[in-house]
Amino acid sequence: MKSIREVINEVLHAEMARDEAIVVLGEDVAGGMTTEGAGGFGGAFGFYSGLYERFGSERVIDCPISEASFVGAAVGAAMTGLRPVIDLQFFDFMTVCYDQLANQMAKLRYMTGGQFKLPLVMISLVGAGLRAGAQHSQSLHPPVVALPGLKVVTAADAYDAKGLLSAAIRDDDPVIFLLHKTLLEEKAEVPEEDYQIPFGEARFLAEGDDVTVVATLAMRRKAEAACARLAAEAGIAADLIDPRTLSPLDVEAIAESVEVTGRLLIVDESTPCCGIAQEIASAVAQHCFEWLRAPIRVLSTPFTPVPFSPALEDLYLPTERQIENSVRALLADESASVLR
């Protein structure tokens, strides 16, 4: 059994040993200027522990607190043949380097007619639940999913984290690799051997013909608990799907499930305006409308900044009980609001 934090570090060690073109850039990834790398924690979440000591200062590079500068530097490095791994710590900070993301990283391979590859990975953390305040708790994956030229990957357990990160590092396109802060210590069985998980293939975590539940990141873990309880207490069998890659999105797998169940609930932590849940709902409504036996339901966060107050933050996040009630309402074809 290994945690997400452990497998991220293991993959980075293995991939950097395999390919000398891989370099790491970020704040404190080598331990910080005061430690000169030795004995450093290895980034805000410990993903890069031991890399500086093993691979040296030319491949593990501490950068100033200027996301725009080191993300831009990584884009240039990728164009010259290196394979950068960027540590962005909190994905809230993507707003600081959005020009590099949207106008450089996402477009340069296309604009050069494929003359340049952009083989880089940005590892970052999303999500609320740690009392980190509105500026360190957002789920800002929808803005990057909307950018053609970027691949957007999420991992909710250690098995997926290992296979998806290994695939991301070997990909010749830029990949945004997102984890949820509250899941880093979640443990799962992880094979020792090397493996990659292809992008664009959703994962079925449970199978059933009553309802389709699509859930991402921390919401997937809540949906797993809710669906298990519904099965045990009410005999309700759900197809539970984790998309894993949000771009490309495995619409076909979701559509095939909805064709059988006729009911769809989407649970995602981003806000209800222009989110990934709305994109999935739109795709299903467009391609699967004749199979629907009840209106599509979306369960997301309120359209407000993430509260700092613990009591308010707990109310802000979708709960297992809400997921259960949403499923029951779908099966009853109820239109009443879902209570907590």
Image: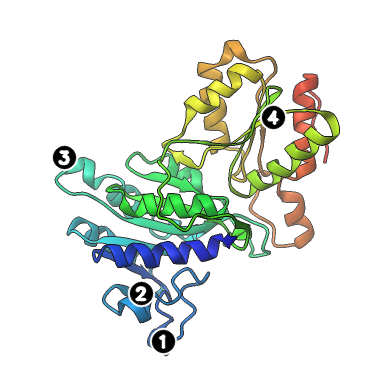
The Cα atoms of the two marked residues, 1 and 2, are separated by 16 Å
Q: Earlier in the sequence, mark 1 or mark 2?
A: 1
Q: Is mark 3 on a helix, strand or loop?
A: loop
Identity of the amino acid at label 4? Ala
- The answer to whether residue 274 is seen in the rendering is no
Q: How far apart are marks 4 and 1 (CA)?
A: 50 Å
Q: Which labelled disc corresponds to residue 38? A: 1
Q: Which residue lies furthest to the left in this view?
A: 115
- The one of 302 and 338 positioned closer to us in this rendering: 338
Q: How many labels does the image show?
A: 4
- The amino acid sitting under disc 1 is Ala
Q: Position of residue 334 (x, y in %)?
A: 80, 21
Checking the image for residue 238, the label placed there is 4
Q: Mark 2 points at which residue?
A: 63
Q: Tell me which numbered mark, 1 or 3, is placed earlier along the sequence.
A: 1
Of the 4 image quadrants, the one containing the C terminus is top right
Single out the mark in the foreground, 1 or 3: 1
Type of amino acid at the residue the image marks with label 2: Cys
What element does badge 4 sit on?
strand
Picture coordinates of residue 174, whole percent (x, y): 32, 50
Whether residues under marks 3 and 4 lie with C-beta atoms below 8 angstroms apart, the answer is: no
Q: Gap between marks 4 and 2, in whole Å? A: 46 Å
Decide which of 114, 21 is in the foreground and name it. 21
